[in-house]
Image: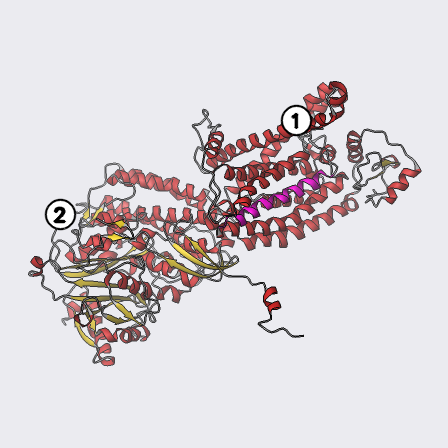
Amino acid sequence: MVESLIENWGFPEWMAYLIAATIPCVLLLHVVAVGALFFIWLERKVSGRIQDRLGPTRVGGKYGWLQSLADGVKLISKEDLVPAGADSWLFRLAPYISVSCCLAAYLTIPFAYGWVAQNLDVAVFFVLAILGLEVFGVILAGYASGSKWSLLGGMREAAQVVSYEVPLGLCVVLPVMLAGSMNLTTIAQVQSGWFTSWLIFYNPFLFVTFWIFFTCALASVNRAPFDLAEAESELVAGFHTEYSGLRWSLFFLAEYGSMFSVSALAVLLFLGGWNGPIPITSWIGWTFEYGWFWGTLGNFVGLANFIFKCSLGIVLMMWVRWTLPRLRIDQVMTICLKYCLPLVCLMLLGNLMWPWIAGPPSASFVQKRYEAYQHLHPEPTTETEADEETTAESNSVAISLPQQVNEKQKVVLTTSSTTDSSLPLQTN
Amino acid sequence: MTMQADDPRLIEFDVRTDEMLVNMGPQHPSTHGVLRLVLRTDGEIVSETTPHIGYLHRCAEKIGENLTARQFIPYTDRMDYLAGMNMNLGWSLAVEKLLQMEIPEKGRHLRVMIVELNRIASHLLGMGAYGLDLGTFSPFLYAFREREKILDLFEAVCGARLTYSYLTIGGATHDLPPGWLQQCEAFLDQFEPNIEEYHTLLTTNQIFVKRTAGIGLLPAEMAISYGCTGPVLRGSGVDCDLRRDGEPIYTRMYEGYDFEIICERDGHYPDDYDYPPVPKEAQLGDCWHRFYVRMLEVVQSVSLIRQAMDKYSQTAGDYGIPVRFNHKLPAGEAYLETESSRGWMGFHIVSDGTAVPLRARARSGCFSNLSVIGEIGHGCLIADIPAIVGSLDLLMGEIDR
Amino acid sequence: MAETESSEQPELSWLEGTVLPALEKSFPEEIVGCTTEVLDPWIEVRPESIASVCRFLRDDPEFHMDMLTNISAVDYFEPDPKKAKRFKYDPHLELVYHLWSTHSKRRLILKLMLPRWKNDQAGQLPEVPSVNSIWRTADWHEREIYDLMGIFFLGHPHLRRILCPEDWVGHPLRKDYEMPLEYHGIRNR
């Protein structure tokens, strides 16, 4: 994009970079903001239906779909209070940290094939790291509020999120291991085709892992039954007890934003990303092989697929929230350290042993994995002895497939941190 | 090299963690109104709980000394405003005892019907609010769905939805409106199957069990010593219910009714009810058992109402005539306790022979039930405090009076 | 007592036939009397010995009064001089203890008479031994009575106001109580 701006439009380089950065940022901001508004409205409707009532019905017509916008306007117009006992500067800063971390996670989330702000090769790692950073906003808010309830909320959040990072990270390892890449686009492309090729159905271990991931994700974004940091019946409102108006709504924006991003992560890692359950788009030829127009059309279908699946994940989270009582802090820790962690380790082990149990991955899967990589890194790779030597030297992790696989398809995958796109994947 | 206690280096590196005093209430979402608890906490662990009450104190007893007995009825509504009918009944019966007055049989059946309906409404709210204390919102609205219908029934009877002043000295202010029994029947038919839902949402929910079983253990001896009554006492396994054990003027209301006191005997609850089994983790006297007793009492009340409706429609005669507002009381005193939904509601009325009592003492069940919180509310986590307070099903209007 | 009457009123015959003799045997000096010709018959006890009588009633296996359901304080006084002429009681305070047994399901009422003021000096609260160590119910009930009626309970571990604010003046349930006109800048009238 930068190149085309410079070459075709004659922009100076700095401006080209600026424009190229602004467009995805603005788009993403809107996705997050509008998404949050939509999901807040949806949550109120879903909870209403679960609780045998209607939810909002007035603002914006029949379904009250403008309710969250009206609430937003109300919140913005509210007084921005800072308690006298608060550390004023940190108190004001905290919501922005939360919300910016939440936004940053979107940078590497692909919404459809190639529709990603930054096609990072370590996207999975990046998203997890950034989501983990969000906790700083909460801890700061808890600390800076100068309220005991807020402090307790902040400490709970710290303990909880730090513990759940571990199983969450381990859950993510399984799809990454299979796809042979930490690039989210690659992982999603590996799952193209029928829904049976989604990684959740790849083997029983991944199926279990998905649910562990969902549980941990729930905990890491502070949704009930893990909403201890803001447990209203215990801690008044936890870390955001003292917040009001816009700053308070920023915390909510961050909460709903990260709900969407963990959902998106789950969809990309386990549920086929933008690939529908039935590969209709490839049947009717809406792919990039037939030109950019058809590809873009197909991408829109993929986008709809992706958002639908993410919304399903979010609705599931809402369903859980409005059904279950809240856990206690020690029970939250028990679930994490005594159940989730050993279980996910077991799943990891099982997944490693799966080729030994059920035979090697199917030829089509290996082919897809190869193609997915090719799509992302279209430069032709040339086989030379030197290249192979370089690979061997670069401390890469090699997963060699069992010998039965056709020699042609034998792939050596590396997950090295190098960004040199010509090297990591080799076919013999 | 040894370090002395006053060694400055030691003090410098001696990182101490302080206990923290946290003020829970009177404006706290889960203290059921205006209860104030001062918690001494070490991190998440509560080492001491001190209750402070009186934020809703209206000195109703003083008001009672300035009004005639019947004029005091609306003030009893405002004590336990979730079980107003039970409060009305308590005061009415105490005054009737002093007047040595007997109301007709039909009036007694009417009272049973109304009071038990109110007990259901009160327990439903207690159950819903308990869910809220434990962080789940939906059971609250499920409970309200049914409670609204009971309030509709009450509205049809007396025009009020919360402060009824319906049962009064000498009977009730009105007879039931035509068609009311059918409405009540329809409500019970619709309500009874729904109780299953509450058990699914809370009683048998694994998280709920984990949050309540073994928490806030109140042994029977302690419960008795603290004067805990109602479901709190029965949740500790004490077989005690004034509807059976009370004074004759009260138990006569329940004469001929078939009901068994809800209480664990020899490790199991009465068999009349279709109820989910007691989980392994639950110990007698914990939050779970107190909650469970309430849930079973709802079923018990449904059966009592059905019996009362039968008896009411089969009994000929009058439902009772209320006394005049300035009815003179004989000199003397009477004390009567009734089984209200939250515990024993006792009224001690002393009269010097005029229409206005010399003393109108209200013994509140919640008052004694709350006093036990200092004993069972320590050594637990902060999150257990709402669980314990909620399981006592407190109502500040009744505590502060 | 006639045979028919006692079968009609088992409570009364139990009180007269069992409780009173046992109490009079153990506490010959402390029991003032027993009033039976009323709705709720009571046994009157000397104020200074209420704690020992209560302890006996709780611990004696025959009575086992393990629950104190209520303590109520009554102020017999008529502040209005016009009405006072027709007021047929001497000014005094009464404490009524309502006991209950979870075993025999029987109830028992103890009463004690107190002067309105100690040594008849206005402002000096009358004193009664606390039964807090016998039944924990008494803890809050005695605090409430101290707060609202102004009776001092000797031996209560933390006798302070419970319903009124700590700095409240006066005891609202006393018949001669007058509402303060102002409390911390809040006008009451």
Which residue is more in the foreground, C182 or B159?
C182
Residue C81 located left or right of residue B33: left
- Is A140 a magenta residue? yes
Q: Is residue A383 above or below residue B247?
A: above
Q: Is residue B292 visible?
A: no
Check disc 2 and give the amino acid type: Arg
Which residue is more in the foreground, B87 or B154?
B87
Both labels 1 and 2 in a single chain: no
Residue A179: percent from left, percent from top: 75, 38
Query: Crowding near pointer 1: few (<14 within 10 Å), some, many (20+)?
Result: few
Residue at image x 23%, y 73%? C47
- Main structural element of the magenta stretch: helix, strand or loop? helix
Residue bearing the label numbered 1? A23
Output the chain of dot 1.
A
Residue B376 located left or right of residue A136: left
Residue A338, image quadrant: bottom right
The quarter of the rendered structure image containing the N terminus of chain B is: bottom right
Task: Measure the C-alpha gap from mark 1 to mark 2.
Answer: 81 Å
Residue positioned most to the right? A385
Which region is colored magenta?
A: A122-146
Residue B137 located left or right of residue A220: left
> In what element is the residue under mark 1?
helix
Residue bearing the label numbered 2? B324
Residue A235: percent from left, percent from top: 48, 50
Residue A39 located left or right of residue B92: right
